[in-house]
Structure formats: C-alpha cells, structure tokens
Amino acid sequence: MDKEALVKAIQARREEIGGILEQLSDEQMCQPGLVDAWSVKDVITHLNMWEAELIQTLHQASHGAEPKTLVFNENFDEINQVWFDTNQNRELERALNDFDGIERQICRMVEEYDQQALFTPGHYLWLGNQSLAGLVEDICLHHEAHHLNDLRVWLGKAGLLQG
C-alpha cells in the first residue's frame, strides 16, 4: 500500500458508512441501542474522538515530537466512557459535520507525509515495529470496520438495512 491507496481506502470506508447513514432519519441516528446504550450519533462521535487523537498524533510526529495522545493510552474503555458522557448532548449535525471534516483532515495529513516516514516500520521509535501508516489503518480502517459491522447488525435486526 502507498499513500494514494491509503487515502483511497479511508475515503471508500467513509463513503460506505455515509451510504448507510443517508438511509437513516435523524431520529434513528439518535436512538440508543446500536452498541449497548450508544446510538449511531454516539458511535460517530466516538470515531470522531479517536480520529481527532490520530490527527494530533500525526501533527506531533510531523514536527519531530513523540506524540503524547490518548491513542497510546491502554484504558480504552475508560476513555470511551468519559467521551460518551461528555458528548451525550452533542448535536447530531455537529457530529456528522465533524465526521466529514476529520476524514478530510486525515487524508490531507497522510498525503503530506513522506512515503518512507509513513510506511517504514520502526521509522518512529515510539511506534516500535509498527509503521505510522499501520496506526492510521488501525484507527481509521479497522476501527471503522468494527463499528460498521455493528451498524449493519443493528440495522438488520431493526429491519432497516437496505442494499
């Protein structure tokens, strides 16, 4: 994979999620139950929060610093709960706008990185044997795939899944 392929994969995943979101009403997106008490809006906000941490990580790394972001904190459940509690009253429109803006920002940042710095495992000592691109894939592609599956299962159970 190279930068262009990574950016295209991120964009394709977002288009896939967007295609499903377009089928839902605002009320459906705010209905709890997608993942425990979380609504679609809550999951979108959850993805936004982790991907905003990725943006900070990419920014710090691009300036030669070892990132000090929550991406490297192993207390995921606690962080997720704090973010869930903090964002309960977040407006749906804002969550969706952030979702689009964060994708554009991540893609732009990936495109600005040097190919070798992005894809060479161990290039950044603080990543161990992982590449920065691997981190982007984990947070954007794999994390979104996990929640996309949750969304499909929820829609299937509710009889809302189309196409």
Image: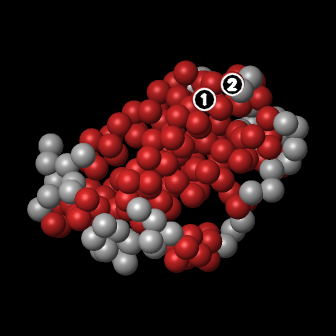
Q: Are marks 2 and 1 in contact (CB under 8 Å)?
A: yes
Drawn side of residue 121 relative to residue 20, left or right: right
- Quadrant location, the C terminus: top left
Residue drawn at point x = 88 percent, y = 38 percent: 64
Drawn side of residue 77 relative to residue 8, left or right: right
Q: Secondary structure at mark 1?
A: helix
Amino acid at dot 1: Arg
Where is 162 relative to 83, above or below? above
Residue drawn at point x = 59 percent, y = 37 percent: 106
Residue drawn at point x = 47 percent, y = 27 percent: 8
Residue 28: percent from the left, percent from the top? Answer: 23, 63
Residue 158: percent from the left, percent from the top? Answer: 15, 66
Amino acid at dot 2: Glu
**Residue 80 seen anywhere in this rendered image of the structure:** no
Residue 149: percent from the left, percent from the top? Answer: 34, 56
- Residue nearest the observer in this picture, 126 or 86: 86
Whole-number angstrom distance, CA of label 2 to CA of label 1: 6 Å
Drawn side of residue 2 relative to residue 35, left or right: right
Residue 148: assigned label? none
Badge 1: residue crowd in 10 Å (few <14, some 14–19, many ≥20): few
Q: How is the image coloured?
A: secondary structure
Q: Secondary structure at mark 2?
A: helix
Residue 112: assigned label? 2
Where is 156 relative to 142, above or below? below
Q: Quadrant of residue 25?
A: bottom left
**Residue 5 seen anywhere in this rendered image of the structure:** yes
Disc 1 target residue? 108
